[in-house]
Image: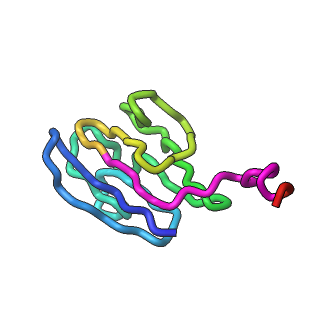
Amino acid sequence: MNLKLSVRCLAKQTAELVFNHFPLVIGRSVEADVTIDDRWASRRHCLIEAQDGTLIVQDLGSKHGTLLNDAIISEAVLKPGDTLSIGLTTLTADYDYVEAFGNAETVAGS
């Protein structure tokens, strides 16, 4: 699975990053997989991990919280088009999303 993150700080496009390994740590630390230069971000702010074809985002106890589509989360499914907000930085996700367990009616009706 490839995850593309479009990163913006203060509404300016700063980068488009592509990842195919997980988990990913996002934060202010230079040791993070995605380092963001935002004073409101914690050193290890949040984590994205792959589980059964979907991506899960988890806050790592950050001081200012992780928002997913403007809602504060501790852990949530990250879907294509979703936006993570970390301080003044936004990261928009794009990847091929696979529903867990698929559509049983379609499979059975085939």
29 versus 79 height, above or below = below
In-front residue for pair 88/94: 94
Depicted 59 relative to depicted 7: above or below = above
Q: Position of residue 52 (x, y in %)?
A: 67, 60
Tell me what residue is drawn at x 33 percent, y 60 percent: 34
Residue at far right of view: 108
Q: Farthest top residue?
A: 71
> Can you give x and y, in whole percent of width and height, for residue 86 in the image?
33, 40
Display colour scheme: rainbow
Which residue is drawn at the image coordinates 44% and 47% (left, top)?
Answer: 46
Residue 83 drawn above or below residue 1: above
- Looking at the rendering, in which quadrant would you find the C terminus? bottom right
Q: Position of residue 61 (x, y in %)?
A: 48, 39
The one nearer the camera, 21 or 101, is: 101
On whether residue 65 falls in the magenta region, the answer is: no
Q: In this rendering, would 17 be left or right of 24? A: left
Residue furthest toward the bottom?
20
Q: Residue at x 22, y 41 (%)?
A: 39
Viewer-closest of 86 and 95: 95
Q: Which residues are magenta?
A: 91-107
Return the x and y of residue 16 as percentages of the image width and height. 26, 61
Which is more toward the observer, 89 or 92? 92
Question: Which residue is at a point 30% across and 64% down the rendered structure image?
Answer: 17
